Amino acid sequence: MARYRPLFLVIALLALPFIVAASLYATGWRPAAAGNHGELLDPPRPLPALAGPHGEPLDKTSLEGHWNLVVAGPGPCDEACRHWIVATRQIHVALYKQMSRVQRTWLTDQAAPDSAPLTALQPDLHAAVAGSSAARAAFDLDAGGHRVYVVDPQGRIILRYPADAPPRDILKDMERLLRYAWAG
């Protein structure tokens, strides 16, 4: 029996993680805090129909297939909006090798927004208009202020950040999403 002691020890060490995991699952234990910094939208919101800056319907495929950082807010792009446009650009650049998987969009509820000053400084910025009530509700445009949303490659709004969120938190969430996600 003594010669089988190392074998039993190895089997016990291999089985121990499964026993601990099963007991935690059976007792209903969950971690106290989530790993994300933004507000996880559960269930994710489907991306509503949006319009381009000139009023033409925006093709959803232009937003799908990539991760999107959407700066959304009512009215023209004011100081808070420009702050988030610059911050999302810095986040985008900080992603370095993963930059090609992410695109940025400015979303407003204005019928014909003047996006020329923004796109002149940042040509990779897309502009969109939330014309319908469903689009306004999906991006909380009636709440006022500008916020950042994360849209996944399948066209679902999955994360929302408040107007006073630190850009570093958004960067951390994006790095984590891009590290573990195969899509986009």
Image (tube, rainbow, N blue to C red):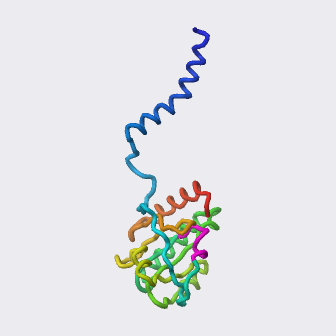
Task: Give the residues in magenta.
Answer: 60-68
How far from the left and from the top, in percent, is residue 44? 46, 64
Q: Which residue ends up furthest to the top in the rendered image?
A: 1
Residue at point 45% right, 76% down? 72
How many marks can you see? 0
Is 80 above or below relative to 33? below
Residue at point 42% right, 63% down? 41
Q: In this view, does 41 lie to the left or right of 8?
A: left
Q: In which quarter of the image is residue 31?
A: top left
Quadrant including the C terminus? bottom right
How far from the left and from the top, in percent, is residue 28? 38, 41
Q: In which quarter of the image is residue 95?
A: bottom right
How far from the left and from the top, in percent, is residue 62? 60, 76
Q: Nearer the viewer, residue 30 or 146?
A: 30
How far from the left and from the top, in percent, is residue 182? 62, 57
Residue at point 61% right, 81% down? 123
Quadrant including the N terminus? top right
